[in-house]
Amino acid sequence: MSEPSFKVDIRLIENYLFEIDFGDFGNFMTDEPEPLGKGEGPNPARLLAASVANCLCASLLFALRKFKEDPGQVTASVSGNLGRVDRRWRIERMNVAIQLGADAEDLSHLERALEQFEDFCVVTQSVRNGIPVAVTVSDKSGALVKSS
């Protein structure tokens, strides 16, 4: 699912405002919240959280589409906790809640896809070496179909 190598360039604009150059995909601004920065863009912790949730959603789509299943509109919400670890601020954990746009009973291979999709997620599995990531998946009706 991922390219074997990648490159992203980052350039300081001012204070804590950085421009991230994604090459053919354009540029993106990040910033730290006040009091360090001005909050003119997401900070790296939010980018990491978005990357984890995005990768999990893509991995779940991949796992379901292998079986020709249509999960409908997939959405996710990710939250994280910051705390002091060895006196330094660290992301202590992330919680990702994925919602499918289809009912579980309409996805005949859902159980099998749910058993394997997290293993396909390059970002989450890499991050889990240092940060616990809890994942839940609910179907269209809101019924919980997976919790880890």
Image: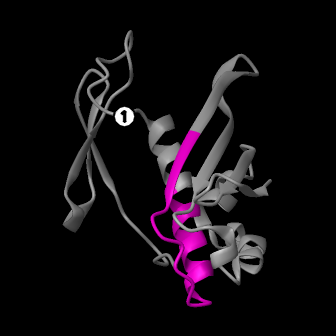
Task: Identify the amino acid type marked 1.
Answer: Pro
Circle 1: element type: loop
Q: Which residues are magenta?
A: 54-78
- Residue 81 spot, x, y in % from top left: 65, 28
Q: Is residue 22 left or right of residue 34?
A: left
Depth check: give the residue in front, 110 or 66. Answer: 110
Q: Residue at x 77, y 75 (%)?
A: 111
- Residue 41 spot, x, y in % from top left: 30, 32
Q: Is residue 119 magenta?
A: no
Depth check: give the residue in front, 93 or 20. Answer: 93
Q: Is residue 113 left or right of residue 80?
A: right
Q: Is residue 69 magenta?
A: yes
- Residue 64 spot, x, y in % from top left: 60, 80
Give the vertical position of 90 relative to 59 (above or below).
above
Give the vertical position of 10 relative to 68 (above or below).
above
Depth check: give the residue in front, 12 or 107. Answer: 107
Based on the displayed image, in which of its 4 quarters is residue 71 positioned?
Answer: bottom right
Depth check: give the residue in front, 14 or 71. Answer: 71
Q: Classify mark 1: residues with Cα within 10 Å, few (<14), some (14-19) or many (20+).
A: some
Q: Is residue 57 left or right of residue 6?
A: right
Q: Number of callouts in the render?
A: 1
- Residue 44 spot, x, y in % from top left: 45, 37
Q: Residue at x 70, y 83 (%)?
A: 108
Residue position marked by numbered label 1 in the rendering: 42
Q: Residue at x 69, y 66 (%)?
A: 118
Give the vertical position of 75 relative to 41 (above or below).
below
